[in-house]
Amino acid sequence: MSQQQSADNVSIDEIPVDIDTTQSAEVDSADVPDEIESITRRLAGKQPPTNPLVVLKAARWWYIHGKGGTDPAFQWAIEWARHLASDTPSDVERFDEFLEYLVTVGFADERHELR
């Protein structure tokens, strides 16, 4: 391991996991690492990522730092990964919840700005 990790700040890859903020249910857009923000914005956009491993990387971050399994960004990332893996239609209601959540977190002022 090339970098020191303290007991309250660890990482599995380059994306840090801040133990103090895990599953806090309160995510602010300023706290989201750039790479996760980029993936999340692409998940909300017209051309979402097509690599399930990239999508799952974002899902993992939102699960750890958001509301766990009930986090809308986590749920949409998992839903999109399922769609990519099985080529089945995705849940439009879950997508709408995801967009609303991103507005709440501060990624945009209105849902339409994310598309």
Image (cartoon, grey):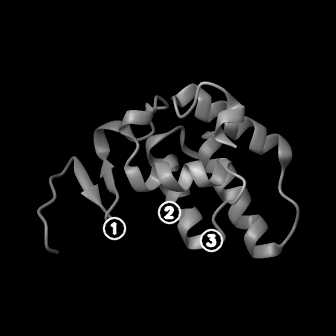
Q: Secondary structure at mark 1?
A: loop
- Whichever of labels 1 and 2 marks the residue nearer the N terminus, that label is 1
Residue 57 in the image: state x and y as whole percent: 50, 63
Front-most of residues 37 and 76: 37
Measuring from the top left, give residue 46's x and y in whole percent.
Answer: 72, 54
Q: How far apart in space, not on screen, are marks 3 and 1 (Cα)?
A: 16 Å
Q: Earlier in the sequence, mark 3 or mark 2?
A: 3
Residue type at numbered disc 1: Asp
Q: Is residue 102 above or below residue 38?
A: above
Q: Which residue is mark 2?
A: 57
Tag 3 secondary structure: helix
Tell me, yes or no, whether the two marked residues, 1 and 2, touch with CB atoms within 8 Å.
Answer: yes
Q: In the rendered view, tell whether residue 61 sits above or below residue 66.
A: below
Q: Residues within 10 Å of mark 2 (few under 14, many from 20)?
A: some
**Closer to us: 93 or 107:** 107
Rendered image quadrant of residue 24: top left
In which quadrant will I find the C terminus? top right
Looking at the picture, how far across and down is residue 17, in whole percent?
A: 33, 52
Residue that appears at 36% across and 38% down: 31
Q: Residue at horizontal 63%, vertical 32%?
A: 101
Q: Is residue 98 left or right of residue 20?
A: right
Say which residue label 1 marks: 13
Q: CA distance from mark 3 to mark 2?
A: 9 Å
Mark 3, other Cα within 10 Å: few <14 / some 14–19 / many ≥20: some
Which residue type does callout 3 highlight? Pro
Residue depicted at 15% across the width and 53% down the height: 6
Residue 109 percent coordinates (x, y): 60, 24
User: Which circle marks residue 52 in the picture?
Assistant: 3
> In the structure shown, which secondary structural element does the residue marked by tag 2 occupy?
helix
